[in-house]
Amino acid sequence: MEPQITITGNLGNDVDHRMVGEQLSVSTFRLANTPRVQRNGNWIEHPTTWLTVQCWRQLADNVRDSLGKGDPVVVHGRLRTETWRTKEGEDRERQFIEATSVGHDLNRGVAKFRRNEKPSRSAERDAVARQALAEAEGIDADPTFDDTTEEDAA
């Protein structure tokens, strides 16, 4: 079973959106979460946790069109670890969230939802594009990985 995570926070930057191949969208942003607790009537801020959030396909397009730096959001997705070896032979790793859902945090404001039409998608095309992105970033990818969810299959 893959680790799932849900976290709230603010976008630390504008959404970075790009195309992988001709048809696959990917958006990334940095999410800042600064826990605050009240002690003896004073608010105390704990250190900020920064996470990279990665969104694919329609979610990537919707995130690009809906969010901006500073927006309060709720993110749910898979906790991932990427590992690679640098040209110098050093092993590196980073953790990030591969989002399955992203939305405005309605505890902190209001939003207006607009439904879009569900596009068709090709799992094979997505796998090829994911491999191309991984190779471009110098990271090993598993082209057999199938991230189709029950919702995608419907």
Image (cartoon, grey):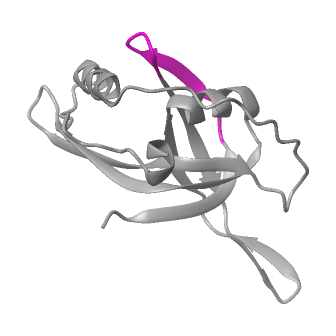
**Residue 10 image position (x, y, % from top left):** 70, 49
Instruction: Describe residue 88's horizontal placement relative to residue 34 as left or right.
Output: left
Quadrant placement of the N terminus:
bottom left
In the depicted structure, whether residue 20 falls above or below residue 131:
above
List the single residue furthest toward the top: 22
**Residue 151 image position (x, y, % from top left):** 51, 49
The boundaries of the magenta stretch are 12-24
Q: Out of 139 and 37, give the one closest to the viewer.
A: 139
Q: Residue at the location (56% across, 63% down)?
A: 6
Question: Residue 119 is drawn in which quadrant?
Answer: top right
Q: Out of 85 and 22, give the one closest to the viewer.
A: 22
Q: Residue at the location (86% across, 57% down)?
A: 108
Tag count? 0
**Residue 4 image position (x, y, % from top left):** 44, 64
Question: Residue 67 is drawn in which quadrant?
Answer: top right
* Magenta stretch contains residue 49: no
Instruction: Describe residue 83's horizontal placement relative to residue 114 as left or right.
Output: left
Q: Can the viewer see residue 68?
A: no
**Residue 142 image position (x, y, % from top left):** 19, 38
List the single residue furthest toward the left: 89
Instruction: Describe residue 78's horizontal placement relative to residue 110 as left or right.
Output: left
Question: Residue 24 is drawn in which quadrant?
Answer: top left
Q: Residue at the location (81% across, 75% down)?
A: 43
List the single residue furthest toward the front: 154
* Magenta stretch contains residue 22: yes
